[in-house]
Amino acid sequence: MREIEITGLGRVALVRSVDCIGAMCPRPQLLTLKVMGEVRVGDVVEVLSDNPSAVEGFPALAQALNCEHLATQRESGYWRMYLRKQ
Amino acid sequence: MTESSNVLMQKGSLKAMGVLLFVIAGSLWALSIDTRFLYLLVYVWFGVIYGMFLQYGRFCMASAVRDLFAVKVPRMAVGMMIAVALYSIVAAIVTLSGFSTFHSNAMGWHVVIGGAIFGFGIVFTGGCASGSLYKTGEGNMNSLLVVLSISFAQAIIVSASGWWDSLVPQSWIDSAVAKDMPAELSVTQGWFDIFTAGYVWDLKGATTAEMFGWADTTFGIVVLNTLLTAILPVAILLVLLYAFYYRKGYLRRSGKTALSMGEEMAGMWAMCTSSKNTALAGIGLGIFAGLHMYVTGVLREYYGIMNFGEMLVAMGYTNGLSLQETVFDPGYWYITTQEAQWGGWVMQQLGVNTMDNIFFGLENGLPNPLLNAPGFMSIGIIFGAAVMALSRREFKWKLPNWESAIFAIVGGILMGLGARIGMGCNIGAFFATVTNGDPSGWVFLFGMVIGAYVGVKAFTKWMDWNASRNSSGCDL
């Protein structure tokens, strides 16, 4: 577990980080589905992706997976997305 | 926004401007050669507009069917339905004004089979035909590999002959022979020729208005083609998407156990606007796809032509025309046929005779890519997406790994096979058809849904098998 700072939310403890940089759809979505099924309620998961199409769909994916989409942060060449299992 | 972000944004905008200036300079160069190239430039610029909207909305139509089964997310399916509704309304206006360029597809089993093969393929390539083009514009070389695979697969499928010719029914061969086609097309050699002349040509294709004898009437165009064939199915599908994919989560988030009719409508609206970028892209694509038909129709009347081939002849370009002196010139958004022409043209330059078949030799021709008007629409999509991706700092060169390269090639071959059997892709065989009152597009979509369902199952099994061999496909 590691702690990170999310703008507007303060420090948040991460339980998993899913590195999907370079992955084509639907791999980022399916991996997120798998990981969110493995963590406990309240856990926060980070997903890294450089796939704009996957990033666009993450808020909707969070809703479908019964998760809270905490934030999407832009880095150089990729995005970090944070989901909390509800 | 930080200072470094501002600098990157400015650099991206400058590069985007550079791409746009390149397209403008190329357009002016074409017009300086012959002002009649305006006809071809309409394809270029509508392609640029499509590319910009596709990238803006991350409008990947493959995910419209795939994500319903993969992760139960209706975002793109909703976006696609919005685009269909808007396109159908504009198409009705264009048809009523007499400038429609639309032609129906033949209805038969081949539509659902082609759709299923295409739908299976798109799960592995990570994008449909137009999605692969706009992702190429984002710098994704895996998507370029998909485009190349679709191109050459189609060219080989429509022109090759071999032992598999004996697999087609004798009745198709007899029917193809009875068509009395020119000898140079050798229609009894090559399964695709036999399939086209012996099966597809014996089928009927019609809009709903034509089926009921109301073609060219306001009632037929507005009520039968637009309301009954496009808007009503869209409304039904949106209600189904809401009921099966969105309502449960909406109830949970609103903290209620039951909803009034007004709240249900608010839920539908929330579903349609859950991704504003996708919804806006759907609206834009729908409107411009309809306008594209109108502008091409007006230019055809202005130049007194029915097909770009006539204009090419008048300008002195006679290479690569079909036996009818035509080239592929749909007059609206289309993807796969011009990509097949690219592959066929390259094979022709390499010494393979790719004109001795119906697809190229009789129907679509094999023009030089510099004179391929719909081909420039596809290139325009790449440039338009690049402009938008650069200006939003989303352009990134990406090279495929071995796994994604194999998926791109094999998936692209399946997409090419499905597109040729189904007579188009999700654009030409679905989007452009249902919006113009041709119900065969819904049959193609049905096939795509089946194919995508099986594809998602297969892809998930592959991921699980791969994960059991390695620690994971992505680091956890």
Image: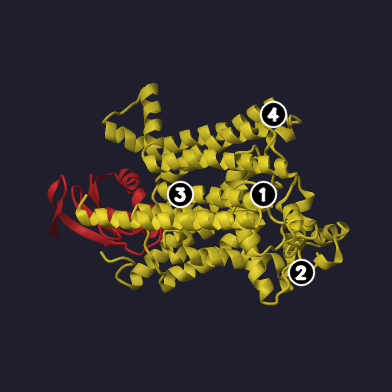
Chain red in the figure, letter = A
Question: Disc 4 residue type?
Answer: Gly
Q: Tell me the element at label 1.
A: loop
Q: Amino acid at mark 1?
A: Pro
Residue occupied by mark 3: B52
Q: Which residue is mark 1?
A: B330
- Pinpoint residue A79: horizontal percent, then vertical percent: 28, 56
Q: Quadrant of residue A63?
A: top left
The residue identified by callout 2 is B166
From where the camera sits, is residue B374 visible?
no
Look at the numbered discs 1 and 4 and tell me whether their residues touch, using CB distance below 8 Å. no
Identify the residue shown where x is 41% and y is 52%.
Answer: B388
Residue B396 is at least partly visible in this image: yes
Q: Which chain is yellow?
A: B
Total number of numbered labels?
Answer: 4
Measured in 3D between alpha carbons, the distance from the residue under mark 2 to the one under mark 3, in whole angstroms, is 46 Å
Local SS, label 3 = helix
Foreground mark, 1 or 2?
Answer: 1
Judge by depth and name the residue closer to the eye, B428 or A40.
B428
Sequence-wise, which precedes: disc 2 or disc 3? 3
Which numbered dot is residue B220? 4
The image position of residue B95, as x and y in percent, is 66, 34
* Dot 3 or dot 4, earlier in sequence: 3
The CA span between labels 3 and 1 is: 21 Å
